[in-house]
């Protein structure tokens, strides 16, 4: 490979990697800050309050404009699964990143 082509290729890699790091760092920080709220949601999902709230949308006086996706088992279950999948992906990626450094 010609040296100039190699340099241009490596420059592209450097810039792309830097761009992605600049974009992902704020998101990782935001996700880290939301962990306390996520733990609260998980505690609620496993609590007697959740069980009591689960039947409330069936009552006639339930506010029509109150969204309650949190009371659908699928929404919270999907979030748990997505959270776990991301955590595993981040662990695997982090291990690769550390080994590459």
Image (cartoon, rainbow, N blue to C red):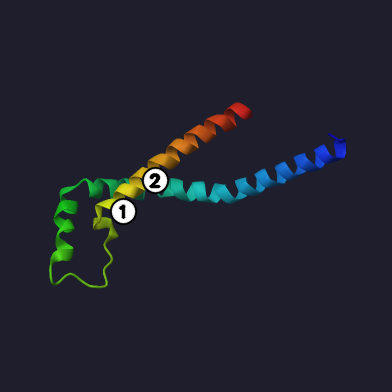
Q: What residue is rendered at 26% in x and 62% in y?
A: 68
Q: Position of residue 33 (x, y in %)?
A: 43, 48
What's the CA distance linking mark 1 and mark 2?
A: 10 Å
Q: Residue furthest front?
A: 1
Which label belongs to residue 43? none
Residue 38 in the image: above or below residue 66: above
Question: For residue 82, which numbered disc appears in the image?
Answer: 2
SS of the residue under disc 1:
helix
Residue at the spot 18% in from the left edge and 64% down from the top edge: 57
Picture coordinates of residue 47 (x, y %)? 19, 47
Residue 13 drawn at (x, y percent): 71, 42
Q: Residue at x 13, y 71 (%)?
A: 60
Instruction: Please name the residue that numbered disc 1 is placed on.
Output: 75
Which image quarter: residue 98?
top right
**N-term mark: 1 or 2:** 1
Tell me the crowding category of disc 1: few under 14, some 14 to 19, or many 20 or more residues within 10 angstroms, Cα based.
few
> Which secondary structure, mark 2?
helix
Is residue 65 rendered to the left or right of residue 100? Answer: left
Which residue does the image show at 51% across and 50% down from the upper left? Answer: 27
In the displayed structure image, the side of residue 100 where residue 53 appears, left or right: left
């Amino acid at each position: 490979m010609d040296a100039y082509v190699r340099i241009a290729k490596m420059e592209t890699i450097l810039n792309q990697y830097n761009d992605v790091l600049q974009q992902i760092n704020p998101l990782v920080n935001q996700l880290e800050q939301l962990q306390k709220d996520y733990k609260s949601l998980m505690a609620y999902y496993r609590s007697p309050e959740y069980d009591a709230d689960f039947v409330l949308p069936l009552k006639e006086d339930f506010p029509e404009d109150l969204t309650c996706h949190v009371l659908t088992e699928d929404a919270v279950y999907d979030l748990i699964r997505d959270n776990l999948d991301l955590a595993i992906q981040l662990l695997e990626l982090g291990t690769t990143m550390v080994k590459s450094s």
